Amino acid sequence: MTQPSARAWPSALVASLLVLLITALAHAEPYSYGRDKNENTFTFSYDAKAGDTPQRDSYTGPITRGDKDKVDFYVYVNPVDGATIGQRLSGDLDLRLARRLPVRYDGIFTLKIVSDMTGEMMYTDSLEDHFVLRFKPGQKAHTVHFAFDLPSGDYSAKATFAAT
């Protein structure tokens, strides 16, 4: 029987450690956010008579969380075709996994709509939601929906999350 060479031991040790590390990461508990907020600025014009949003803009500035951010969190407001008055707009909070490790959201999402003309809060609502984003098909994204309506005007939308 031949003995393994002295060079084989370090390679075998490194390979074993890599397998252990990958296995540990695969079974790791999801990271849980305590607080989060949308990364984009979303503005829109709304025509209540037509139930339409003729002007919508979304833009992001320099994201201060940079490479450490595990989830891309954006807010949008879209018209809902054929909806009844009071539910003709959909506030959509779009969360997408930006890293390979899972992330848990267990808490309250809040949508705020502010009038660009007066600075007045025109709509605010909160929804409790619980989900885990995973790096698997069909589990990398989640959308939280708010149904509402507004008078005609120009608005800005913001969203936040707080763990419960």
Image (cartoon, rainbow, N blue to C red):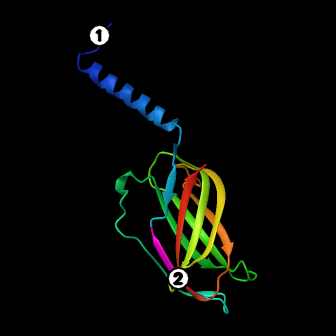
Residue 118: % across, % down: 52, 84
Element type where label 2 sits in the image: strand
Q: Residue at x 35, y 54 (%)?
A: 67
Please name the residue shown 29% across and 19% down the image. 9
Left or right: residue 8 versus residue 31 is left
Name the residue that disc number 2 marks: 44
- Number of other residues with Cα within 10 Å of mark 1, as a class: few under 14, some 14 to 19, many 20 or more: few
Tag 1: residue type?
A: Gln
Magenta stretch: helix, strand or loop mostly: strand
Q: Residue at x 67, y 80 (%)?
A: 149
Residues under numbered marks 1 and 2 in contact, where contact means CB atoms less than 8 Å apart: no
Residue 43 lies, with reference to residue 3, above or below; the image says below
Query: In the figure, is residue 14 to the left or right of 145?
Result: left
Check the picture and name the quadrant holding the N terminus. Answer: top left
Q: Position of residue 104 (x, y in %)?
A: 56, 47
Nearest the eye: 160 or 97 = 160
- Name the residue type under label 2: Phe
Q: Residue furthest left?
A: 6
Which residue is tagged 1?
A: 3
Q: Is residue 15 above or below residue 157?
A: above
- Which contiguous range is marked in magenta? 40-46
Name the residue rendered at 69%, 80% in the picture: 88
| Marks 1/2: CA–CA distance | 73 Å
Residue 90 spot, x, y in % from top left: 64, 74
Q: Is residue 162 above or below residue 19?
A: below
Classify mark 1: helix, strand or loop.
Answer: loop
Left or right side of 152 for 58: left
Name the mark on residue 163. Answer: none
